Amino acid sequence: MNAPLPAISGLARRLVNDNLLDEETAKAALAQCTQAKTPFVHYLVASQGLDARTIANAASDEFGTPILDLDAFNVESLPKDIIDRKLVSIHRSLPLFKRGNRLFIAVADPTNLRALDEIKFNTGISTDAVLVEADKLDKTIDLFLNAQEESLGDALGGLDDDGLDALDIEAVDEHGAGDDDDDKEADEAPVVRFINKVLLDAIKSGASDIHFEPYEKAYRVRFRTDGILKEVARPPTSMATRLAARLKVMSQMDISERRMPQDGRIKMKITKTRAIDFRVNTLPTLFGEKVVLRILDPSSAKLGIDALGYEDGQKQLFLNALNQPQGMILVTGPTGSGKTVSLYTGLNILNTPERNISTAEDPVEINLEGVNQVQMNAKVGLNFSEALRSFLRQDPDIVMVGEIRDLETAEIGIKAAQTGHLVLSTLHTNSAPETLTRLLNMGVPAFNVATTVSLIIAQRLARRLCPNCKVPATDIPDDILSEEGFDGIGIERSEFDIFHPGGCDKCSNGYKGRVGVYEVVRITPTISSLIMEGGNAIDIAKMAKEEGFNNLRVSALRKVAGGLTSLEEANRVTKD
């Protein structure tokens, strides 16, 4: 049984009274445009062949509203960042201008209150309807939307198109699905293409992170390359929701949830044998969701110890500690200092068929074949300490803990290191001596620290000078070099040259890649005694220097003397 046709009123009644429509046709048109979710006037022009100017005149007479000629408006002057393009497309309503605290919206039907109310709700600005002809409105809306798509393309600037359509992208973690409208919006070709181009160019440029950042009057995309953030694109702010939705769909997050942070992963297959993982995190900010992608390249975990930048003596200390059957090796430094790569390098050296290796990570960044990697999950109570307890029941040879965050984790790790296991972990401290005092401050007994910790590696990452364009620094006086500390690095001034960054088409502002700066301290019997006596970080640092272990500052200056980095970069990463 067919549903009854709706009663007619407003503009439909006026068109019937003016003999432009008969009543049955008007009722059927109202029912059909409601079902098709199409505005009434646009439906009449497209399906019934009515003249747009005639309908506009009828509406003007009915409601006493003058008709505005859209041909007089320049599309470029329309406010592009006030209304999401999705609303414009659905309601066929266009923002014309803002005056005071009111937004004037071009509509072909002044009775389309649903459109005005939804626009008001989404923008937070009161709306007034401006009557225009439907055909001219459709034409202007198409120009408006096309201009936005072109601006999205322009925002890419010099981003590379090569291989864009061949990308094989899949989600890794499943968190939920959003509604159909959001899925459709996220799958629009221009948005998909833009995101793919950004991801591909980030990989090609060697970026470690991608930041999608919404602000009140701007939206920017930045890459972190060699530790420094650089802006690469400025899409229109009206694209913010669509870009975030696309990234959330790709990583299988809940795209209907915009109030809470979420985590996910994306896998991009570059070739048949190489894939890049992206760790994705969303964060609700004042003007929308910021999305950050951490690029996880498995090849970075297989660089080999020689590629990391250790000096010969430091490398040998690390290898000696890895060859011990038990003890604790701690890697320390701020976020982004390369601790994970150092740990994975050590695990790769240890990863043989004869060894049982288990890791507790939050999150698991890179998959290592032959290593039992466990992802922490706070929702079910799986934390570092709980994972460590389980490891010890499974006869491990080597245990890696992503981070020692509390006394319980520290105590279990110490116990494992005391009972015949080699334990690797990280702490967030600034130097090797501070790592020892941090454990003591957590509540670990001094005896356990002194007898269990075998090696501490504090590290930073400095930008590496481009070998093609670095230039000798002849403008630095010797007294300045002495003040910087070059007299204490163990190299005669006549035996080294210092270089400044140049700049060429093969690098970024004179730098290309990064090199590690390390403080590698073996816990000698003398340092152990000092820990037992209650020595503080300053005392331990002094003793480490006497024992011949270079601190971060000396190591950085030695990198400068070796022509690997600049003095400015050494100061950036190590100078207090």
Image (spheres, grey):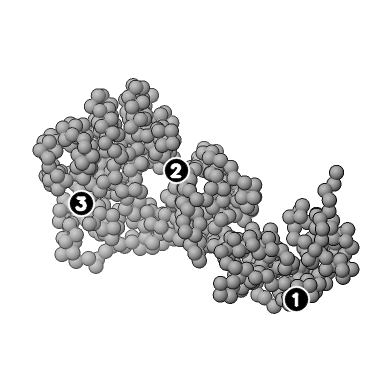
> Percent position (x, y) of residue 422?
28, 29
At horizontal 62% and vertical 68% (from top left) the residue drawn is 127
Which residue is at the front of the view, 303 or 570? Answer: 570
- Report the residue marked by disc 1: 64
At horizontal 46% and vertical 51% (from top left) the residue drawn is 283
Q: Left of 536 or right of it: where is 243?
A: right
- Report the residue marked by disc 2: 297
* Amino acid at circle 3: Val
> Percent position (x, y) of residue 193?
59, 53
Q: Left of 80 or right of it: where is 556?
A: left
| Tag 2 secondary structure | loop
* Amino acid at circle 2: Asp
> Percent position (x, y) of residue 179?
62, 46
Q: How far apart are marks 1 and 3 (CA)?
A: 82 Å
At horizontal 50% and vertical 54% (from top left) the residue drawn is 289
Say above or below: 569 vs 387: below
Which residue is at the front of the view, 38 or 357? Answer: 38
| Tag 3 secondary structure | helix
- Report the residue marked by disc 3: 554
The quarter of the image holding the N terminus is top right
Pick whichever of labels 1 and 3 is earlier in the sequence.
1
Pick whichever of labels 2 and 1 is earlier in the sequence.
1
Q: How far apart are marks 2 and 1 (CA)?
A: 65 Å
Tell me whether the residue at label 2 lies in contact with that at label 3, contact meaning CB atoms closer than 8 angstroms.
Answer: no
